[in-house]
Amino acid sequence: MLVPLLLLLLLLLLPLALLRQPRSQDASLCWLARLQHRVAWGALGWAAAWQQRRLEQSTRHMGQSQQQALRWCLQGAQRPHCPLRGSTDTSTFRNQLPLTKISQAQEEESGEQLTPPTSNQYHGEAFLQATLLGLAALKKAYPEVVSPGSTARVTPTSPWPSPLPWPGHALGQASPPGARDPGALLLEALRCPGLRGLEAGTAAELMDVFSGLEADGEELAEAVATGNPGAPLPRRAAELREALEQGPRGLALRLWPKLQVVVTLDSGGQTEAVAALGALWCQGLAFFSPAYAASGGVVGLNLWPEQPRGLYLLPPGAPFIELLPVNEGAQEEAASTLLLAEAQKDMEYELVLTDHTRLTRCQLGDVVQVVGAYNQCPVVRFVCRLGQALSVRGEDIGEDVFSEALGRAVGQWPGAKLLDHVCVESSILDSSEGSAPHYEVFVELRGLRNLSEENRDKLDHCLQEASPHYKSLRFRGSVGPARVHLVGHGAFRALRAALAASPSSPFPPEMPRVLRHRHLAQFLQRRVVS
C-alpha cells in the first residue's frame, strides 16, 4: 500500500510542478503557488487520514497487530539456521532468543559499537507514518502555521522523520529548497518576519543556531540589509539589530512576532535543550515533536501537539516492541518481558526491539513510564536512558535523578541558566589523585561567568537529597564530593559536532549525559573557564 500512496501523491502534484516557472517573479503566478499548496495539503490530508485509519485498526486489535509484526520479523530473518523459521508463537520466540543488551562497557573494551536494531523497510514505513500523522496533528492544533511561507527550517536536518514526496515549497516552506548550509537557512528565515513555525532537526541543534545568531548577529543583519542574497531589506535589518540588542530572553518572538510553535525531533538527551530554549530564546512558545526517535528509529508517535510535555503512543506494528519492567533489568536473561497490551499505568519499562535482519531482541536502554492508553495501546513519556547512569561505588544514579538534582542546584545559583551538561566518572580522567572516586561535572551556563565554591557545593548537597545511597556513601567517605567545572561558550556545540562526525552516529544524534571515553572528557576539560 505504501508504494501506490507515494505514486498517487506524486501524480497529483507533478502537473503543478511542471507549470511552475523556476525563479519566476511574475505576480500573476501567485494563484498557481496557492493552488499547488492547497492540492499538496489535500493529498497530505488524504494520506494522513489513511494512516489514521490504519492506526485505529491496529491499536484496537493489539494482540493481532503485534503478532503480525512478529511474523513479519521472523519471515524476513536473515540469520542462518534460525530456530524460529515457520513459528510465530511469542512464547517460543522469547524462550529461543535471549535478550541482548547494548553495553557501554563492551563497546569500550572491544572498541566496536554494538549496533541497535535497524531495518530500512520498517523504518521507512514508520517514518512516513510519523511524518503524516504529525503534520496533520500540527495543522489541527496550529492551522495558521501551515499557510504558505509561514514555516522555515533553520538546520540542514529536518524534524520530520521521512522526507515528503513533493517539493518543500508546495507546503509553504520559507527555506530554500534543498539548502544544506546552516547560515543560508537562518538568513532566509531572518528575512521573513511573518513566520509562525520554526523547524530544526533537534532542540540541541536549534540552541546552537540561536547561540550562533547572537555571536554573528551583526554580520547577518548586514547581509539582510545589503541583499546578500536576495533583495536589500534595510528596515528588516534594523529590526534584527534592535531585537538582538535586548538580549536572548524572548529573542524568537522579537524576531518573528507571529511565531507560535517550534518543531524539533525528540530523542535521548534533548530535555535540557528544550528547557534552555523555553527559558531563554524561545520563551512563550509551544514545542512539538512529531515522534520520539531512539537508536536511529521511530519508537513513539506524538498525536497531541497541545500537550506541554511530550506524550508518545507506542505503535503495535513493526518493529516488534516488548516492555521489560525496570526493576527486573538486572536479571538480564531471567527477566520476563511484556507485550504492549500488558503494560500497566504508572509502571516504568525498558524498551526491547527485535532486529529484522539479525533477529536479536535488543534492550535499547530507553525507559518509559505508562501514563495512559489509546485504545489498547500504551501512551508513554520517556524518563531516562539506563546507559547514562552514574556509578562509582554501585550507587547507580540515573540520568533523570541527576538532571533533577542539577536543576535544583543551578536554581540556587543567582542569575544562572543551565544550557547543557555532561558528567564523567573520575576514573575516566584519572582525577581522584588518591582521594575517593567522584563525579566530574561540566556545565555551560548563561548569566554566570564564575562559580564560587559555595555554588559548587550545592550540587553535592542536592545529589545527597536525591539519592539516599549516594548520601550514605558520602557520609562514609567512600565517594568524594562532585566537582563542578564551568566550560566556555560553544564548548558543547563543538562536542556535538565531534560526536556527529562519527560514522556510527545515528540521526537524531543522542546527546550523552555521561561520557565514557577519555578523549571526549578531555575535549571538554580543555575548555574549562572556571
Image (cartoon, rainbow, N blue to C red):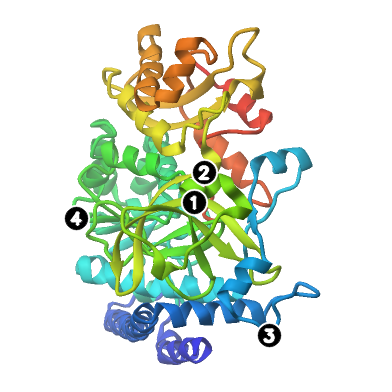
Measured Cα–Cα span from mark 4 to mark 3: 57 Å
For label 3, the SS is loop
Q: Which residue is mark 2?
A: 386
**Residue 344 quadrant:** bottom left
Q: State if disc 3 and disc 4 touch (CB < 8 Å).
A: no
Q: Which residue is mark 4?
A: 258
Q: Residues within 10 Å of mark 3 (few under 14, many from 20)?
A: few
The residue closer to the viewer here, 323 or 515, is: 323
Disc assigned to residue 366: 1
Mark 2 and mark 3 lie on one chain; the one further toward the N terminus is 3
Q: Which mark is residue 86?
A: 3
What amino acid type is highlighted by mark number 3?
Answer: Gly
Mark 1 Cα within 10 Å, few/some/many (few <14, many 20+)? many
Q: Earlier in the sequence, mark 4 or mark 2?
A: 4
N-terminal of the pair, mark 1 or mark 2, is 1
CB-based contact (under 8 Å), mark 4 and mark 1: no
Quadrant assignment, res 405: top left
Question: Closest to the observer: 254 or 294?
Answer: 294
Q: Measured from the top left, where is residue 412 in percent x and y?
A: 28, 19
Q: Are marks 1 and 2 in contact (CB under 8 Å)?
A: yes
